[in-house]
Amino acid sequence: MGRIEERVLRVLNFKIIILTFVLFSLISCNTAYGWASAVVAIPTGQMLNEHKKILQDAYYKLQNDPAYSLEIFPALTKIQAWDVVELPARVGPGPDGRGIKYSNHWYNPRTGKGNAPTAASESFAELNRNLLGVGSSNAPKSAAYLAHYVADLSVPYHTTGMPYEDV
C-alpha cells in the first residue's frame, strides 16, 4: 500500500470514528432538566422534584451509618415535606421559598462571597440541637435545609458566583 492510500485510509477511519461518535451521541441524548425543590411537570408527564430525590438518596445512605437511629432521626416523608415550593410564586416551606436569602444557596471560594457554607453549618447545628432535644423540635426542617444547601454546593453554577451577590 502506498503513502497516499495509507493517508486516505487514516482520514476515512477518522471520519468513521467521528460519525459513529456523533450518531451515538444523538441516539443517547435525553432532555436534561435542572434540579429544584419545586414540583415541575415535564413533557413526558412526569413530575420532577430533584431535591426530594436527593433527600431520599441521602436518607437511605444515612441509614448505613452506625450513628443513625430510627428512634431519633425524623422520617423521610417529614423531611421531604420541608423541601418543596410551588412555582412561579415560590410559595412553600422549602429553602427555595420566598423570604430565604438567595445567597444561602451559593458560595464562590475565589471571592469568598455567598452564604451556603454558613447556612449549611447553621442548619447542621440546629439539627443537632433538635436531635438532642435542645431548643425547637423541628428536626425535619433542619435536615431538609441542611441537605438542600449541601446539594446546592455540588452544582458548579452555585460555586462560581452569582451575578447579583447580595440578593
Image: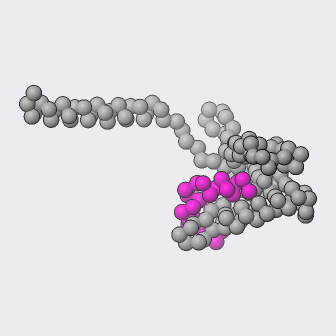
Whether residue 42 appears in magenta in the rendering, the answer is no
Give the farthest residue toward the front: 66
Q: Is residue 59 visible?
A: no
Q: Is residue 66 left or right of residue 150?
A: right
Give the farthest residue toward the top: 1
Q: Is residue 90 left or right of residue 129?
A: left
State the residue at coordinates (55%, 72%).
111
Give the farthest residue toward the left: 2
* Residue 112 drawn at (x, y percent): 59, 72
- Residue 99 versus residue 125: which sits nearer the camera? 125
Q: Is residue 30 above or below residue 158?
A: above
* Residue 67 drawn at (x, y percent): 79, 49
State the residue at coordinates (58%, 54%).
155
State the residue at coordinates (80%, 47%).
68
- Residue 62 versus residue 21: which sits nearer the camera? 62
* Residue 120 drawn at (x, y percent): 71, 61
What number of labels is visible?
Answer: 0
- Quarter assignment of residue 141: bottom right
Whether residue 160 appears in magenta in the rendering, the answer is yes
- Residue 24 versus residue 91: which sits nearer the camera? 24
- Check the image and tell me how it is coloured: one colour
Q: Is residue 119 left or right of residue 1?
A: right
Q: Is residue 162 above or below residue 33?
A: below
Quarter of the image containing the C terminus?
bottom right
Q: Is residue 133 visible?
A: yes
Per the rendered image, the range of residues in magenta is: 146-167
- Residue 17 versus residue 3: which sits nearer the camera? 3
